[in-house]
């Protein structure tokens, strides 16, 4: 598989593994098998966040990457959304909640989907992003991921303009100088691009919704390494998953495309589509 140099000297596979469902909508056994198959298939880019798995995904990924795997992969994590106290209280009930939502989804797709999203939102909080909170978040992620450095740290979908942006970038530079992080940028939805457009050129790299012809990447991304998420939302009528991936990597040949995939068949199919 082609690799992309998102940060100098470190190479990501063109297909990245999105860890958002780990220990959330996907149980422990299936999460572990998904990571194993992805790693064996040559995926080297793993995208995670403190909010994923309602606070447990980083630690789960860190455990998986012990035994020599860490040196062969790129870890991208984030700061800005975290699991709250409700998530910790409901941790013992996640298995029951997962089964219940699956059952409801089968009987009432629309209401079950919105209900599941509402539950997820109730267990997550946007946190104030400051220079101090960035440094603390990085050190917590380092500990959970059981690593000495993070390849990429992204500000996680800040919903409004950041007040002390210069201090935040200074904090990021200090972390880079100390070898704690290698690259720094933003992870944004399409709606958030205009809010932060003025400061995106200062980033090392950017993460966005996968671009479609109707919604191109913002001008601020030109010339920067990029990571694209939610690729299959861009599917056109009649396109297979493989067709979507081939189209996106052809149009964005210097980008990593993230897929949240926990079926062994889907993982291998996605990898084969771009290999």
Image (cartoon, helix red, strand yellow):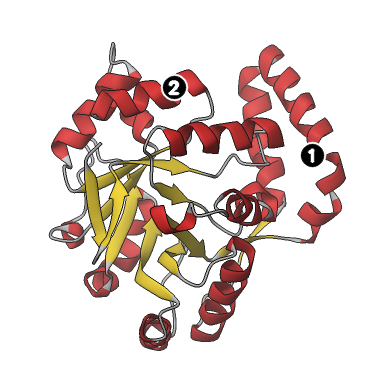
Give the CA distance from mark 2 to mark 1: 25 Å
SS category of the residue bearing label 2: helix
Q: Is residue 73 visible?
A: no
Q: Please name the residue that numbered disc 1 is placed on.
A: 94
SS category of the residue bearing label 1: helix
Between 264 and 48, which is closer to the camera in this rendering?
A: 264
The quadrant of the image that shows the C terminus is top left
Question: Which badge, 2 or 1, is on the more N-terminal residue?
Answer: 1
Quadrant in the rendering for residue 111: top right
Q: Please name the residue that numbered disc 2 is placed on.
A: 266
Locate residue 198, reporting x and y percent: 25, 72
Left or right of residue 172, residue 221 in this image: left
Quadrant in the rendering for residue 240: top left
Left or right of residue 179, residue 104 in this image: right
Indicate which disc residue 21 carries. Answer: none
Locate residue 210, reporting x and y percent: 30, 41
For residue 52, above or below residue 30: below
Question: Are the residues tagged 2 and 1 within 8 Å (C-beta)?
Answer: no
Residue drawn where x is 61% and y is 22% of the image: 110
């Amino acid at each position: 598989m082609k690799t992309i140099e998102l940060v100098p000297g470190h190479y990501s596979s063109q297909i990245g593994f999105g860890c958002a469902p780990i220990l959330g909508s996907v149980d422990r056994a299936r999460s572990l098998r998904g990571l194993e198959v992805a790693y064996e298939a040559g995926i080297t880019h793993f995208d995670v966040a403190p909010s994923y798995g309602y606070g447990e995904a980083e630690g789960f990924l860190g455990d998986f990457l012990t035994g020599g795997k860490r040196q062969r992969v790129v870890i991208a994590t984030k700061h800005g959304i975290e699991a709250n106290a409700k998530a910790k209280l409901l941790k013992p009930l996640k298995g029951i909640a997962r089964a219940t939502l699956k059952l409801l989804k089968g009987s009432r797709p629309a209401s079950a989907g919105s209900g599941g999203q509402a539950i997820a939102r109730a267990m997550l909080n946007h946190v104030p992003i400051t220079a101090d909170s960035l440094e603390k978040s990085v050190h917590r992620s380092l500990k959970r991921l059981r690593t000495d450095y993070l390849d990429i740290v992204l500000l996680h979908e800040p919903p409004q303009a950041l007040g002390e942006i210069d201090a935040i970038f200074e904090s990021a530079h200090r972390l880079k100088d100390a070898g704690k992080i290698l690259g720094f940028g933003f992870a944004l939805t399409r709606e958030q691009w205009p809010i932060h457009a003025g400061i995106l050129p200062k980033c090392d790299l950017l993460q966005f919704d996968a671009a479609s012809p109707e919604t191109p990447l913002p001008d601020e991304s030109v010339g920067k390494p990029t990571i694209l998420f939610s690729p299959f939302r861009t599917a056109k009528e009649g396109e297979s998953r493989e067709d979507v991936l081939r189209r996106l990597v052809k149009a964005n040949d210097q980008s990593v495309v993230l897929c949240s995939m926990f079926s062994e068949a889907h993982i291998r199919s996605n990898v084969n589509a771009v290999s």
